[in-house]
Image (spheres, rainbow, N blue to C red):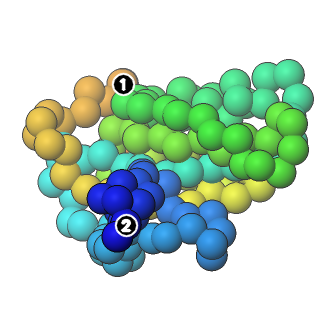
Amino acid sequence: MRSPASSRRPPTVWSRWPPTSTTRRTPPRASCWWAWRRLAAPTGADKTSAVFWLRDDHPGALLDLLQEFAIRGVNLMRIESRPTGQGLGQYCFSVDCEGHLSDRRVGETLMGLRRRCLNVRFLGSYPRADEQPPSVARGATDDAFTEAVDWLNRALDGRA
């Protein structure tokens, strides 16, 4: 007769990170990762989650990427680093930021990361649990981005 300890399965640890290999077991509700990928309608009090991978390790690499958020006035609510397992100095970063992907400042931030990073994985934009709208800095509103685009178009046409 087996002891109760030997008949138990080994403990399974679940995390918000998707599995990185086929040898790991996936959580029973792994489909929630696909549900997150459907874009929820903006509520005005949203949060966006993404993971980005550094292209290379050099002094100031993370600062270069964080400036994409700073120059557009996007507030980071959470940032976590994880080694990729590809070698020393190879990291990915998981972030939550204020705003919805459809907000110009958030969309342009992710486009900037996409240009500069090895990879960017958009996890979703969804309503914040605390329902607090973000405090958007002067010059970082959607109207300010639209005005800047209009100015650029006038400059290109020789009217600025």
Q: Quadrant of the N terminus?
A: bottom left
**Image quarter of residue 98:** top left
User: Disc 2 vs disc 1: which is toward the camera?
Assistant: 2
**Label at residue 138:** 1
Can you see residue 148? no
Q: Is residue 88 above or below residue 47?
A: above
Q: Is residue 83 above or below residue 139?
A: below
**Mark 2 and mark 1 residues within 8 Å of each other at the beta carbon:** no
* Residue at 21% in and 66% down: 41
Type of the residue with mark 1: Arg
Can you see residue 63? yes
x and y percent of residue 73 in the render? 45, 30
Using the image as rendered, state which of residue 107 and residue 17 is in the foreground: 17
Drawn side of residue 85 relative to residue 21, left or right: right
Q: Secondary structure at mark 2?
A: loop
Drawn side of residue 13 relative to residue 112, left or right: left
* Residue at 49% in and 32% down: 79
**Label at residue 2:** 2
Using the image as rendered, state which of residue 115 and residue 60 is in the foreground: 60
How packed mark 2 is, by other alpha carbons closer than 10 Å (few <14, some 14-19, many 20 or more), is: few
Using the image as rendered, state which of residue 41 and residue 79 is in the foreground: 79
Q: Secondary structure at mark 1?
A: loop
* Residue at 49% in and 70% down: 25
Type of the residue with mark 2: Arg
